[in-house]
């Protein structure tokens, strides 16, 4: 697994590979010309390594920024859901309290109705006095 610090290290040249060289036969060239060609090829290769390292660093930075943005979005979503859950739980508690109060009121009404019915029955049996 790559970490940001490991990705920012310079890229080492791969063993057994060489930069693209001119197709001019080197036997006809002087040693100085061959040396100059080798230096030019090396400079091109080093520039390519620097360019690729820079691109890799930029891509890594972009990747980390995108990952951080995703994490932030998920945390915000989670916070919104937590707030919504608390609101729902609060509403549920309020509804339970109201239900309990309604059940108590119904019980009182039932008792009053029972008392009134008992008085009516007593009045009817006593001759309406």
Image: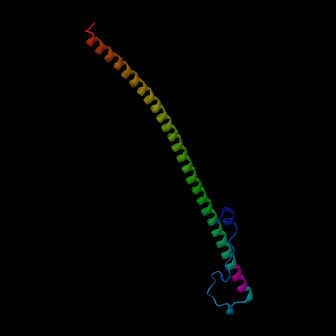
At x 64% / y 64%, what residue is drawn?
A: 57
Q: 50 and 13: which one is in front?
A: 13
Q: 19 and 13: which one is in front?
A: 13
The number of discs equals: 0
- Majority secondary structure in the magenta region: helix
At x 56% / y 48%, what residue is drawn?
A: 75
Residue 37 sits inside the magenta stretch? yes
Image quadrant where residue 34 sits: bottom right
Give the image location of residue 63, x and y in percent. 59, 60
Q: Is residue 55 left or right of residue 103?
A: right
Chosen colour scheme: rainbow
- Considering every residue shown, the one lying at the far right of the view is 32
7 up-or-down from 31: above or below: above
Q: What stretch is highlighted in magenta?
A: 34-39
Give the image location of residue 83, x and y in percent. 53, 40
Q: 47 and 49: which one is in front?
A: 49
At x 64% / y 91%, what residue is drawn?
A: 25
Give the image location of residue 94, x and y in percent. 47, 31
Residue 61 sits inside the magenta stretch? no
Image quadrant where residue 65 sits: bottom right
């Amino acid at each position: 697994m790559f970490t940001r610090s490991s990705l920012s290290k310079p890229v080492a040249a791969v063993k057994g590979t060489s930069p693209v060289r001119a197709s001019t036969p080197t036997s006809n060239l002087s040693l100085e010309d061959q040396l100059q060609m080798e230096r030019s090829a090396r400079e091109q290769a080093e520039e390519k390594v620097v360019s690729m390292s820079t691109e890799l660093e930029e891509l890594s930075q972009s990747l980390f920024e995108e990952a951080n943005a995703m994490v932030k979005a998920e945390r915000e979503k989670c916070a919104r859901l937590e707030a919504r859950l608390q609101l729902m739980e609060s509403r549920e508690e309020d509804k339970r309290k109201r239900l309990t109060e309604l059940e108590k009121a119904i019980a009182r009404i039932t008792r009053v109705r029972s008392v009134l019915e008992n008085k009516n029955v007593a009045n009817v049996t006593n001759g309406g006095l």
